Image: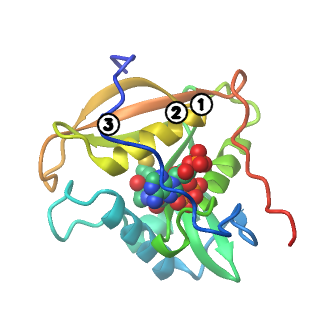
Amino acid sequence: MSGGGEQAPEGGGAPAPRAAGGGEAAGVQIAFGGEGFEDELTAIINAAYDAGEAGIWQAGWTRAGLANIGYYLEHRELVVAWLDGRPVGCVRVTRLEDGAGMFGMLSVSPEAGGQGVGRKLIAFAEAQFPDAEEMELELLVPRGAPHPAKVRLHEWYSRLGYVQTGRRDFAHPELVAPADLWVYRKNLRATPATPAPDRAPT
Ligand SMILES: CC(C)(COP(=O)(O)OP(=O)(O)OC[C@H]1O[C@@H](n2cnc3c(N)ncnc32)[C@H](O)[C@@H]1OP(=O)(O)O)[C@@H](O)C(=O)NCCC(=O)NCCS
């Protein structure tokens, strides 16, 4: 890793208020698994990334295919957010060579967004590594004009205790323009775990 101390991408602004009654993802359960729901999970990931990475990729690019999901399931890497028996989001959880935990491919169905499902998925991912010093994530950031969704993510991850520790070139033939992978780490010992309270019964 290189760099560190990067400036926040500009142009974020204040987060939009949560939908009224959005609460804390009431009724959402988080668990490893997803067998039998491969098609739905693939669709959720691709819809989430279509929205979150609009303008970054050429038309036709997709974040995940069925083969990816099958691999993650086979290796017990996929964590799914369930609501009423259907998946509404997921995250891939792995351990890095240096012992740190990592999450990636964090995706929440656009219809379920803004209600705390993403935060619950991160909290679950962090909890899988009680012995780890650090948790890592990567953010794909286009060079040049700030990308609003990436600005929002940078600000959110920063609030959760993630600090940018590096940046590396990311070359992919389907990118519209050059982009970098920004690497973030959270010190799990020094920073409080991501909270994921259930909404109080009403
Ligand atoms: C990123 C993503 C998983 C977040 O899922 P989510 O369920 O909406 O997340 P949450 O409801 O827990 O909210 C996350 C934060 O975003 C903020 N937020 C939610 N909706 C927002 C909106 N419409 N505009 C701006 N900020 C918003 C919230 O304030 C929250 O921050 P807080 O917990 O400090 O208040 C989801 O937007 C997504 O799938 N994005 C596309 C894929 C992607 O970019 N993944 C991450 C790659 S690193």
The N terminus lies in quadrant:
top left
For mark 2, does the 10 Å Cα neighbourhood hold few (<14), some (14 to 19), or many (20 or more) residues? some
Q: Position of residue 200 (x, y in %)?
A: 85, 63
Answer above or below: position of 118 versus 110. above
Residue underneath mark 1: 161
The C terminus lies in quadrant:
bottom right
Answer above or below: position of 143 versus 91. above
Q: How many angstroms separate mark 3 from mark 1 (CA)?
A: 18 Å
In the drawing, does residue 34 fall left or right of residue 113? right
From the image, state whether disc 2 or disc 3 is nearer to you: 2
> 46 or 6: nearer the eye?
6
Residue underneath mark 3: 181
Q: Residue at x 36, y 51 (%)?
A: 149
Cβ–Cβ below 8 Å for labels 3 and 1? no
Residue 136 appears in view: no
Per the image, label 3 sits on a secondary structure element best described as strand
In the drawing, does residue 71 fall left or right of residue 174? right
Indicate the quadrant where residue 78 lies: bottom right
Report the colour scheme.
rainbow
The numbered mark, 3 or 1, whose residue comes first in the sequence reads 1
Residue underneath mark 2: 158
